[in-house]
């Protein structure tokens, strides 16, 4: 039953098959050996998958769907392959698997939260407040003080979403003021879900999955190599390969943050995109490697492809770890693989 319920998600594993006891090296798309010998031209140049759905575990899927469709009114209730779901206007689904006990949210896995674009973050916050939604404060510095949107505190600098202690001291000294405009904010949803809403954007829609990776740059290489993500070289970063993708976590925490002690935002990767859904990741915030996502609240994500057999051949040839072999999900075929920080990803054939 679990195989059938979870068939829509695809998992990719950046670090090789750990079940065999060995770690295969992370490879850049350009590195020698990045594309396994024996791959056909078609397999090596398969188009990047689209983002199909996020799969959540829930004790009450119907109540959860009612919550999401009320808070984000451009969404619509529906089903996919017989499973309860709702759909964002950009044709991204959120599917639900009914479970008997509250799904785990701890210990932290690679999946941190999922997020929506909204047209006005402050108006959305007001509407959520009036509906009794639990909104989460953002700490603006370790000493205290909170806001409910990032736009209501000192803005980040140099493209960063937060400031270090030194950056906060500098902003205070210079009299920097909040913009009170576009920003990000968080709410608590059904089953203890953490949901980001970000504005001000042109339209309301499902926008991103935010993750933690044990090695962000190695994970980026893995997604580029195995899922054919376009290579986007950051101007302030060296070209990453298997030889230099492993790095130390940045020493400084930043604010605003959901925890008063701040959060580590460096290194971070923001260039992974499936269709119009972004997959962002920061480095693992703790010292323990991430555990598997299956069975947790955010169980897996699903990527859509047109030729599943070609993708299976490619992924097998490249040594990607398969969690589930090909199976049927209603009228659809899918496999489940594991990513570099044990995130479960379904690959589903949508023609």
Image: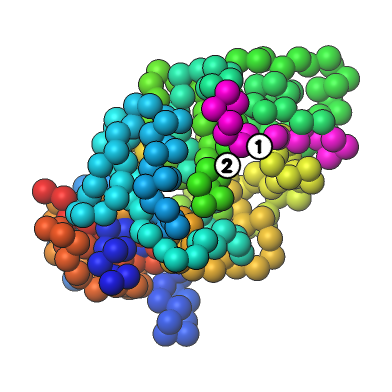
Who's the residue at 42% across and 63% down the image? Answer: 99
Q: Is residue 275 visible?
A: no
Q: Position of residue 173 (x, y in %)?
A: 88, 20
Write down the quadrant of residue 100 in the picture: bottom left
Disc ID at residue 188: 2
Q: Secondary structure at mark 1?
A: strand
Residue 20 lies in the magenta stretch: no
Which callout, 1 or 2, points at the residue further toward the start of the chain? 1
Q: Which residue is nearer to you in this view: 209 or 230?
A: 209
Residue beneath the point at 19% across and 69% down: 327
The answer to whether 69 is drawn above or below residue 111 in the figure is above
Q: Is residue 262 left or right of residue 170?
A: left
* Depth check, front residue: 77 or 345: 77
Answer left or right for 224 relative to 182.
Answer: left
Label 1 sits on residue? 136
- The spot of residue 189 in percent (x, y) is 53, 43
Which residue is at the front of the view, 22 or 145? 145
Q: Is residue 337 left or right of residue 122?
A: left
Q: The magenta stretch spans which residues? A: 128-144
Whether residue 133 appears in magenta in the rendering, the answer is yes
Give the residue at the far bottom of this rendering. 21
> Image quadrant of residue 325?
bottom left
> Quick check: marks 1 and 2 in contact, CB under 8 Å?
yes
Residue 180 appearing in the image: yes
Q: Which of the colour schemes (rainbow, by chain, secondary structure, one colour) is used?
A: rainbow
| Closer to the camera in the image, 331 or 242 | 331
Q: How would you rate the neighbour count of disc 1 (Cα within 10 Å): few for under 14, some for 14-19, many for 20 or more?
A: some
Name the residue at 70% across, 35% down.
Answer: 138
């Amino acid at each position: 039953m679990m195989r059938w319920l979870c068939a829509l998600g695809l998992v990719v594993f950046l670090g090789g098959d750990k079940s065999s006891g060995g770690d295969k090296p992370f490879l850049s798309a350009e590195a020698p050996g990045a594309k396994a010998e024996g791959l056909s031209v078609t397999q090596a140049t398969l188009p990047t998958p689209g983002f199909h759905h996020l799969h959540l575990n829930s004790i009450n899927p119907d109540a959860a769907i009612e919550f999401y469709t009320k808070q984000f009114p451009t969404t619509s209730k529906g089903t996919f392959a017989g499973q309860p779901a709702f759909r964002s206007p950009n044709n991204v689904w959120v599917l639900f698997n009914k479970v008997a006990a509250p799904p785990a949210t701890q210990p932290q896995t690679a999946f941190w939260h999922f997020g929506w674009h909204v047209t006005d973050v402050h108006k959305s916050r007001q509407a959520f407040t009036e509906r009794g939604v639990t909104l989460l404060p953002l700490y603006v510095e370790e000493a205290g003080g909170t806001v409910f949107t990032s736009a209501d505190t000192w803005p980040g600098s140099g493209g960063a979403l937060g400031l270090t202690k030194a950056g906060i001291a500098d902003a205070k000294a210079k009299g920097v003021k909040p913009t009170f405009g576009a920003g990000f904010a968080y709410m608590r949803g059904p089953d203890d879900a953490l949901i980001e809403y970000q504005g001000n954007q042109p339209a309301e829609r499902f926008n991103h999955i935010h993750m933690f990776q044990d090695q962000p740059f190695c994970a980026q290489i893995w997604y580029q190599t195995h899922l054919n993500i376009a290579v986007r070289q950051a101007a302030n970063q060296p070209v990453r390969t298997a030889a230099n993708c492993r790095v130390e976590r940045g020493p400084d925490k930043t604010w605003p943050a959901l925890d008063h002690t701040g959060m580590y935002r460096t290194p971070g990767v923001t260039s992974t995109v499936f269709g119009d859904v972004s997959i962002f990741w920061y480095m693992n915030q703790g010292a323990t490697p991430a555990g598997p996502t299956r069975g947790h609240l955010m169980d897996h994500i699903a990527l859509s492809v047109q030729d599943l057999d070609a993708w299976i051949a490619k992924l097998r040839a490249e040594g990607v770890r398969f969690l589930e072999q090909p199976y049927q999900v209603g009228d659809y075929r899918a496999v489940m693989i594991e990513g570099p920080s044990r995130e479960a990803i379904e690959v589903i054939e949508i023609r």
